[in-house]
Amino acid sequence: MSDKKVVQNREIKSKDYGLFCNYLEKQCGIVLGENKQYLVQSRLWPLVGKFGFDNLGSLINKVISGHARQLNTAVIDAMTTNETLWFRDVYPYELLADKLLDQLAGRRTPVRIWSAACSSGQEPYSIAMVVKEYLTRKPNAFPGGVQIIGTDISVDMLERCKNATYDNLSLARGLPAERKKKFFQAADNNSMQLIPAIRNMVSFKPINLLDPYSSLGKFDLVFCRNVLIYFSGDIKSKILQKIAAGLQKDGILILGASESISGLSDKFDLNRIERGIFYTKKQ
Ligand SMILES: C[S@@+](CC[C@H](N)C(=O)[O-])C[C@H]1O[C@@H](n2cnc3c(N)ncnc32)[C@H](O)[C@@H]1O
């Protein structure tokens, strides 16, 4: 086979691209927009050989037929952007440590925190570290316990969350040295694993934000960060509606630093703090 043929096979026809964009938005809300053919090509090409196809067109037609579960999972895993880091943007975690945990302390029922698109786990585990430090200062603060739940659509990411093992590169992103020393232990291949005391504070579940999630129960605090940016306004609104329904009275929502509910939901009041904003469910 000539090099030219290989390059040609990697190309995605505009009809297949259109079909794939529709499929992806229906499956997980991600809107690709125009001219993202290169992204689809580079992310899906590794699956062509792996699943025994000759070209991207046949892979796309198979996955949109709805009769290929494993392929569907692999395509969603490949198309989601999982960029994350420890204590991302810092202020949500300062807010938690300095204000929100004080407000929630003393409750007899469990305090419930949801990291709604948790990627490889840095977000829910950063929350767990903050809660752990709070409990070190005030051991009896939460008589009903604290439940932290991390969810994501990506099965691959949820596996990583459960392993709780991170290489040097990811450990270097946002994790203060003191917390690394306190909460991690050496693991194989120059990586480190979170200690059981932190791992055991978080449970993980696959949840597609497009689906219902009332089965998760009510939350006091929801981190839904850096995921709404991938969705259309209509889908953002629907997700915000469902999150509001899943929040306790006075429940709090924290979005990503570049995200806002403006024009999308009237279910929240906006609160400004020094370095960012957070939302409180309206009465
Ligand atoms: C950029 S990461 C954000 C991770 C973390 N929240 C943060 O701010 O660092 C976006 C995550 O959203 C997940 N995601 C994308 N579409 C989703 C959907 N429909 N339902 C649930 N999770 C989704 C991706 O798998 C990815 O892990």
Image: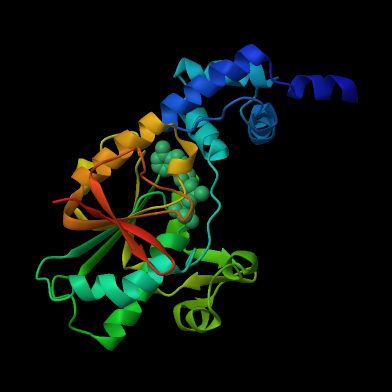
Residue 142: x %, y % from top left: 18, 75
Is any atom of residue 22 visible in this view? yes
Relative to 104, residue 21 above or below: above
5 lies above or below 202: above
Scheme by which the image is coloured: rainbow
Residue positioned 68% across, 31% down in the render:
45
Q: Residue 149: percent from the left, percent from the top? A: 31, 57
Quadrant of the image for the N terminus?
Answer: top right
* Residue 260, above or below 124: above
Side of 169 relative to 9 (left or right): left
Q: How many marks?
A: 0
> What residue is drawn where x is 45% and y is 78%?
183
Taking the image as shown, residue 281 lies to the left or right of residue 201, namely left
* Residue 65, placed above or below residue 187: above
Quick one: which residue is furthest to the left in this view? 108
Q: Is residue 271 left or right of residue 119?
A: left
Q: Position of residue 224 (x, y in %)?
A: 37, 51
Quadrant hosting residue 134: bottom left
Viewer-side residue, 126 vs 154: 126
Residue 126 visible in the shown view = no
Give percent across and percent down for residue 161.
45, 57
Asked whether, in this view, residue 57 is left or right of residue 221, the answer is right
